[in-house]
Amino acid sequence: MIIAVDGPTASGKGTIAKALAAHFGLPHLDTGLLYRAVGRQCALSHGNADDPLDALAACDFPDSLLDDPELRSEASGGLASRVSVHPDVRQALYERQRKFALQPGGAVLDGRDIGTVIAPEAAVKLFVVASVPARAERRFREMQAQGRAVSLAEIAADLEARDQRDRTRAEAPLIAASDAVLLDTSDLGRDEAIAAAIRIAAARQTSKD
Ligand code: C5P
């Protein structure tokens, strides 16, 4: 069974995807991390994230970069969102994601275009959303826990800029697949959001059996 979990930054999709993977015993891929690695590699090579050739060259990042804690920073998220607009970058990362989705037994992938582009045949598609204040607050707490100094206002502005870029890009924009189930986590705690996602996935799985 393939489970696609899409949605904007800090909507809770990563936490939900991990929990679904554990619940259904499936491997999980955080596809945002791939774009973050491309953005980080581009910066490390002194490239320009807005230049399609520099961004494409950065797709050859070493796998060890995926363990770099710097990938979790807001700066890497911003770079990821800039390199991800280039069609050649998306194409370069497509095969890796597609192969992961098609492994025997299935997989859980989270990102922006899993249900629409990477695995349109997914049995379960969730589109996870939350209000900007709820997402900014979550990201703020995460950053504080990591000892990173950023203001709540800065985080909210960055989230909105990233949402805008992700939603309006020509290639694979952030959009819910027509057969995705919408899950709004604004007023849900972590465990409530996970329980709701498991309920939706289990119901979908049963209806497709
Ligand atoms: O999910 P995360 O915040 O780690 O993603 C970072 C950025 O990577 C997103 O803002 C988006 O621009 C890009 N991305 C994407 N397609 C995906 C996953 C992430 O374009 N499947």
Image (cartoon, grey):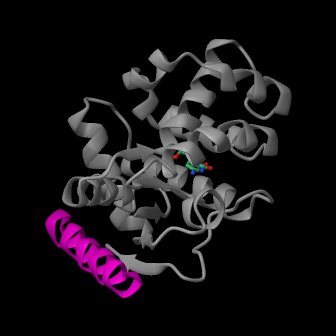
Q: How many marks?
A: 0
Say which residue appears at 52% left-offset and 39% top-offset. 77
Say which residue appears at 42% left-offset and 50% top-offset. 104
Q: Quadrant of residue 72?
A: top left
| Residue 164 position within the rendered picture, expressed as x and y whole percent measured from the top left | 65, 61
Q: Is residue 111 above or below residue 67?
A: below
**Magenta region: which residues?**
187-209
Horizontal side, residue 173 vs residue 103: left or right: right
Horizontal side, residue 10 vs residue 94: left or right: left
Q: Is residue 202 above or below residue 135?
A: below
Residue 61 lies within the magenta run = no
Q: Is residue 2 above or below residue 58?
A: below
Horizontal side, residue 91 vs residue 13: left or right: right
Residue 207 lies within the magenta run = yes
Q: Main secondary structure of the magenta part?
A: helix
| Residue 177 position within the rendered picture, expressed as x and y whole percent measured from the top left | 59, 75
Q: Quadrant of the N terminus?
A: bottom left
Horizontal side, residue 46 vs residue 114: left or right: right
| Residue 174 position within the rendered picture, expressed as x and y whole percent measured from the top left | 62, 64
Q: Residue furthest bottom?
A: 207
